[in-house]
Image (spheres, rainbow, N blue to C red):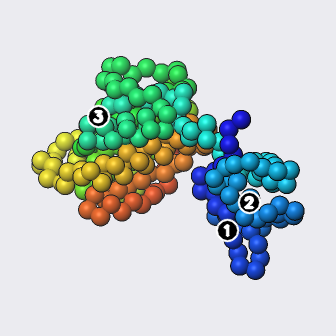
Amino acid sequence: MATARLAPGVALVTVPGHGLAVRTQDGEFLRVDTAGADQEALVAHLTHGGGEDTELARLRAAFDDAGLLARTDAPRTPLAGRTVLLLGAAVLTEPLARFVRAEGGDVRHTEPDGLGGGDPSTAVVWCLDSPVPPGLWDKADELPALGTAWLRCHREGTTVWIEPLAAARGDVTSADVRLRRLAATPAHRELAAYWAGSRTDDTGPAHTAASAALTAALLTADLIAWAAGRTAARRLRRLDLRDLHVTEHPVLPVPAVAPLSDR
Protein backbone atom coordinates (compact mmCIF):
# COMPACT_ATOMS: atom_id res chain seq x y z
CA MET A 1 0.00 0.00 0.00
CA ALA A 2 1.36 3.46 -0.91
CA THR A 3 2.48 5.77 1.85
CA ALA A 4 -0.05 8.47 2.69
CA ARG A 5 1.04 12.06 2.26
CA LEU A 6 -0.69 15.39 2.65
CA ALA A 7 -2.52 16.40 -0.50
CA PRO A 8 -1.02 19.28 -2.52
CA GLY A 9 -2.01 22.57 -0.92
CA VAL A 10 -2.67 21.03 2.51
CA ALA A 11 -0.36 22.02 5.38
CA LEU A 12 -0.02 21.18 9.06
CA VAL A 13 0.46 24.21 11.30
CA THR A 14 1.81 24.13 14.84
CA VAL A 15 0.01 26.92 16.71
CA PRO A 16 1.86 28.09 19.84
CA GLY A 17 -0.19 27.24 22.90
CA HIS A 18 -3.02 25.67 20.89
CA GLY A 19 -1.60 22.50 19.40
CA LEU A 20 -1.92 21.38 15.80
CA ALA A 21 -4.09 22.75 12.99
CA VAL A 22 -4.48 21.88 9.33
CA ARG A 23 -4.84 24.36 6.50
CA THR A 24 -7.05 22.91 3.77
CA GLN A 25 -6.63 23.46 0.04
CA ASP A 26 -9.36 26.12 0.26
CA GLY A 27 -7.47 28.07 2.93
CA GLU A 28 -9.67 26.99 5.83
CA PHE A 29 -7.98 26.23 9.16
CA LEU A 30 -9.18 23.22 11.19
CA ARG A 31 -8.00 22.21 14.64
CA VAL A 32 -6.60 18.70 15.00
CA ASP A 33 -7.49 16.67 18.09
CA THR A 34 -4.46 14.39 18.38
CA ALA A 35 -5.91 12.68 21.49
CA GLY A 36 -3.35 10.07 22.56
CA ALA A 37 -1.10 10.48 19.53
CA ASP A 38 2.22 12.27 19.67
CA GLN A 39 1.90 15.52 17.73
CA GLU A 40 5.44 15.52 16.37
CA ALA A 41 5.09 11.89 15.32
CA LEU A 42 1.89 12.73 13.41
CA VAL A 43 3.57 15.60 11.57
CA ALA A 44 6.55 13.40 10.70
CA HIS A 45 4.29 10.55 9.56
CA LEU A 46 2.21 12.71 7.23
CA THR A 47 5.17 14.58 5.76
CA HIS A 48 7.97 12.01 5.64
CA GLY A 49 6.22 8.66 5.99
CA GLY A 50 7.38 5.85 8.21
CA GLY A 51 5.75 3.41 10.57
CA GLU A 52 2.57 4.10 12.48
CA ASP A 53 0.97 2.92 15.70
CA THR A 54 -2.74 2.56 16.42
CA GLU A 55 -3.29 6.26 17.21
CA LEU A 56 -1.40 7.43 14.13
CA ALA A 57 -3.38 5.00 11.99
CA ARG A 58 -6.62 6.41 13.39
CA LEU A 59 -5.60 9.99 12.63
CA ARG A 60 -4.30 9.08 9.17
CA ALA A 61 -7.67 7.49 8.41
CA ALA A 62 -9.45 10.65 9.59
CA PHE A 63 -7.27 12.79 7.33
CA ASP A 64 -7.96 10.40 4.46
CA ASP A 65 -11.74 10.52 5.02
CA ALA A 66 -11.59 14.32 4.98
CA GLY A 67 -9.84 14.31 1.60
CA LEU A 68 -6.64 15.80 3.00
CA LEU A 69 -4.31 13.05 1.80
CA ALA A 70 -2.85 12.16 -1.56
CA ARG A 71 -1.11 9.00 -2.66
CA THR A 72 2.44 8.97 -3.98
CA ASP A 73 1.46 6.38 -6.59
CA ALA A 74 -1.38 8.50 -7.97
CA PRO A 75 0.10 11.42 -9.95
CA ARG A 76 -2.17 14.36 -10.72
CA THR A 77 -3.31 13.89 -14.31
CA PRO A 78 -6.60 15.77 -14.68
CA LEU A 79 -6.58 15.46 -18.48
CA ALA A 80 -5.89 11.71 -18.55
CA GLY A 81 -8.10 10.02 -21.12
CA ARG A 82 -8.76 13.30 -22.92
CA THR A 83 -7.64 14.18 -26.43
CA VAL A 84 -6.92 17.79 -27.36
CA LEU A 85 -6.80 18.73 -31.04
CA LEU A 86 -4.72 21.86 -31.67
CA LEU A 87 -4.85 24.26 -34.60
CA GLY A 88 -3.38 27.65 -35.30
CA ALA A 89 -0.36 29.74 -34.38
CA ALA A 90 2.66 27.76 -33.18
CA VAL A 91 3.63 30.53 -30.74
CA LEU A 92 0.54 29.50 -28.73
CA THR A 93 -0.02 25.86 -29.62
CA GLU A 94 3.53 24.82 -28.67
CA PRO A 95 3.33 25.91 -25.00
CA LEU A 96 -0.28 24.72 -24.86
CA ALA A 97 0.77 21.27 -26.08
CA ARG A 98 3.40 21.07 -23.33
CA PHE A 99 0.91 22.08 -20.64
CA VAL A 100 -1.75 19.63 -21.82
CA ARG A 101 0.72 16.74 -21.91
CA ALA A 102 1.98 17.67 -18.45
CA GLU A 103 -1.61 17.32 -17.20
CA GLY A 104 -1.96 13.86 -18.75
CA GLY A 105 -3.77 14.77 -21.97
CA ASP A 106 -3.14 13.38 -25.46
CA VAL A 107 -2.23 16.16 -27.91
CA ARG A 108 -2.75 15.99 -31.64
CA HIS A 109 -2.18 18.71 -34.21
CA THR A 110 -4.76 18.92 -36.95
CA GLU A 111 -6.10 21.11 -39.74
CA PRO A 112 -9.56 22.69 -40.20
CA ASP A 113 -10.68 19.94 -42.58
CA GLY A 114 -9.73 17.33 -39.97
CA LEU A 115 -12.30 18.46 -37.42
CA GLY A 116 -15.10 16.07 -36.60
CA GLY A 117 -17.60 15.80 -33.80
CA GLY A 118 -19.35 13.42 -31.49
CA ASP A 119 -16.48 12.45 -29.17
CA PRO A 120 -17.16 13.72 -25.61
CA SER A 121 -13.55 13.00 -24.59
CA THR A 122 -12.13 15.33 -27.25
CA ALA A 123 -11.64 19.09 -27.19
CA VAL A 124 -10.67 21.30 -30.12
CA VAL A 125 -8.52 24.35 -29.36
CA TRP A 126 -7.88 26.89 -32.11
CA CYS A 127 -5.36 29.68 -31.40
CA LEU A 128 -4.90 32.65 -33.72
CA ASP A 129 -2.27 35.37 -33.49
CA SER A 130 -4.51 37.70 -35.49
CA PRO A 131 -8.18 38.72 -35.77
CA VAL A 132 -10.57 35.96 -36.82
CA PRO A 133 -11.34 36.07 -40.57
CA PRO A 134 -15.08 36.09 -41.30
CA GLY A 135 -16.52 32.59 -41.38
CA LEU A 136 -13.33 30.82 -40.26
CA TRP A 137 -14.86 29.44 -37.06
CA ASP A 138 -18.41 28.86 -38.33
CA LYS A 139 -17.96 25.12 -38.82
CA ALA A 140 -16.17 24.69 -35.49
CA ASP A 141 -19.11 26.42 -33.75
CA GLU A 142 -21.15 23.30 -34.57
CA LEU A 143 -18.86 21.02 -32.52
CA PRO A 144 -20.54 21.50 -29.08
CA ALA A 145 -23.91 20.42 -30.46
CA LEU A 146 -22.18 17.26 -31.70
CA GLY A 147 -20.63 16.53 -28.30
CA THR A 148 -17.08 17.84 -28.83
CA ALA A 149 -15.68 20.66 -26.68
CA TRP A 150 -14.65 23.84 -28.47
CA LEU A 151 -12.15 26.43 -27.16
CA ARG A 152 -10.44 29.32 -28.93
CA CYS A 153 -8.43 32.51 -28.66
CA HIS A 154 -7.22 35.23 -31.00
CA ARG A 155 -5.33 38.52 -30.98
CA GLU A 156 -6.48 41.97 -32.06
CA GLY A 157 -3.54 44.37 -31.85
CA THR A 158 -2.44 44.55 -28.21
CA THR A 159 -5.37 42.47 -26.98
CA VAL A 160 -5.75 38.69 -26.75
CA TRP A 161 -9.34 37.43 -26.48
CA ILE A 162 -9.84 34.05 -24.78
CA GLU A 163 -13.38 32.88 -25.40
CA PRO A 164 -15.30 30.52 -23.10
CA LEU A 165 -15.15 26.79 -23.70
CA ALA A 166 -18.32 25.41 -25.27
CA ALA A 167 -19.07 21.73 -24.63
CA ALA A 168 -22.80 21.30 -25.27
CA ARG A 169 -25.64 22.71 -27.31
CA GLY A 170 -26.53 26.15 -25.99
CA ASP A 171 -23.03 27.04 -24.77
CA VAL A 172 -21.38 30.26 -25.92
CA THR A 173 -19.87 29.98 -29.40
CA SER A 174 -17.61 32.33 -31.35
CA ALA A 175 -20.65 33.65 -33.22
CA ASP A 176 -22.27 34.54 -29.89
CA VAL A 177 -19.15 36.41 -28.80
CA ARG A 178 -18.98 38.39 -32.02
CA LEU A 179 -22.63 39.42 -31.78
CA ARG A 180 -22.30 40.37 -28.11
CA ARG A 181 -19.19 42.46 -28.78
CA LEU A 182 -20.88 44.26 -31.66
CA ALA A 183 -23.91 44.96 -29.50
CA ALA A 184 -21.73 46.32 -26.67
CA THR A 185 -19.98 49.05 -28.67
CA PRO A 186 -21.25 52.17 -30.45
CA ALA A 187 -18.42 51.58 -32.94
CA HIS A 188 -20.04 48.37 -34.22
CA ARG A 189 -19.65 49.38 -37.88
CA GLU A 190 -15.96 50.09 -37.40
CA LEU A 191 -15.41 46.84 -35.47
CA ALA A 192 -17.20 44.83 -38.16
CA ALA A 193 -15.04 46.44 -40.84
CA TYR A 194 -11.90 45.68 -38.81
CA TRP A 195 -12.88 42.03 -38.56
CA ALA A 196 -13.72 41.91 -42.27
CA GLY A 197 -10.13 42.89 -43.13
CA SER A 198 -10.64 46.58 -43.98
CA ARG A 199 -7.62 47.63 -41.91
CA THR A 200 -3.95 48.42 -42.26
CA ASP A 201 -1.29 45.87 -41.42
CA ASP A 202 -1.12 44.78 -37.80
CA THR A 203 1.73 46.50 -35.98
CA GLY A 204 0.69 45.28 -32.53
CA PRO A 205 3.29 43.71 -30.22
CA ALA A 206 4.10 40.10 -30.90
CA HIS A 207 3.52 37.47 -28.26
CA THR A 208 6.40 37.13 -25.83
CA ALA A 209 7.30 33.88 -24.11
CA ALA A 210 5.49 35.19 -21.01
CA SER A 211 2.28 36.24 -22.78
CA ALA A 212 2.15 33.01 -24.77
CA ALA A 213 2.66 30.94 -21.62
CA LEU A 214 -0.03 32.90 -19.77
CA THR A 215 -2.49 32.45 -22.63
CA ALA A 216 -1.72 28.73 -22.81
CA ALA A 217 -2.10 28.39 -19.04
CA LEU A 218 -5.54 30.03 -19.09
CA LEU A 219 -6.63 27.72 -21.92
CA THR A 220 -5.29 24.71 -20.00
CA ALA A 221 -7.25 25.77 -16.92
CA ASP A 222 -10.44 25.77 -19.02
CA LEU A 223 -9.63 22.29 -20.32
CA ILE A 224 -9.07 20.99 -16.78
CA ALA A 225 -12.43 22.44 -15.69
CA TRP A 226 -14.09 20.76 -18.68
CA ALA A 227 -12.43 17.41 -17.91
CA ALA A 228 -13.63 17.67 -14.30
CA GLY A 229 -17.21 18.11 -15.51
CA ARG A 230 -17.60 21.61 -14.11
CA THR A 231 -20.20 23.83 -15.74
CA ALA A 232 -18.72 25.97 -18.47
CA ALA A 233 -17.97 29.48 -17.25
CA ARG A 234 -19.62 32.03 -19.50
CA ARG A 235 -16.71 34.45 -19.35
CA LEU A 236 -14.78 36.24 -22.06
CA ARG A 237 -11.24 37.00 -20.93
CA ARG A 238 -9.20 39.91 -22.22
CA LEU A 239 -5.39 39.84 -21.94
CA ASP A 240 -3.49 43.08 -22.50
CA LEU A 241 -0.14 42.19 -24.05
CA ARG A 242 1.44 45.43 -22.80
CA ASP A 243 1.19 44.56 -19.11
CA LEU A 244 -0.29 41.02 -19.09
CA HIS A 245 -3.36 42.29 -17.23
CA VAL A 246 -6.32 39.91 -17.49
CA THR A 247 -9.95 40.99 -17.14
CA GLU A 248 -13.10 38.87 -17.31
CA HIS A 249 -16.41 39.81 -18.88
CA PRO A 250 -19.64 37.77 -18.64
CA VAL A 251 -21.04 36.70 -21.98
CA LEU A 252 -24.29 34.89 -22.79
CA PRO A 253 -25.41 32.98 -25.88
CA VAL A 254 -27.55 34.93 -28.32
CA PRO A 255 -31.09 33.51 -28.61
CA ALA A 256 -32.24 32.46 -32.05
CA VAL A 257 -34.27 35.13 -33.81
CA ALA A 258 -37.97 34.31 -33.92
CA PRO A 259 -39.19 33.77 -37.50
CA LEU A 260 -41.55 36.28 -39.04
CA SER A 261 -45.16 35.24 -39.29
CA ASP A 262 -46.73 34.79 -42.72
CA ARG A 263 -49.69 36.82 -41.57
**Closer-to-camera residue (23/246):** 23
195 or 223, which lies in front? 223
Q: Residues within 10 Å of mark 2 (few under 14, many from 20)?
A: some
Tell me which numbered mark, 3 or 2, is placed earlier along the sequence.
Answer: 2
How far is the residue under mark 3 from the one under mark 2?
54 Å
State which tag comes first along the sequence, 1 or 2. 1
Q: Amino acid at mark 2?
A: Ala
- The nearer-to-camera label among 3 and 2 is 2
Task: Report the label total.
Answer: 3
Residue sitting at 52 percent across and 48 percent down? 234
Q: Give yes or no for contact between labels 1 and 2 (Cβ–Cβ under 8 Å).
A: no
| Quadrant where the C terminus is found in the figure | top right
Residue that carries the numbered disc 2 in the rendered image:
41
Residue indicated by mark 3: 88
- Tell me the residue at 86%/50% (across/down): 54
- Asked if residue 235 lies left or right of residue 216, the reply is right
Q: Is residue 45 left or right of residue 222?
A: right
Q: Three-letter amino acid code at disc 3? A: Gly
Q: Which residue is mark 1?
A: 13
The spot of residue 11 in percent (x, y) is 64, 61
Query: Closer to the camera, 105 or 221?
Result: 105
Quadrant position of residue 70: top right
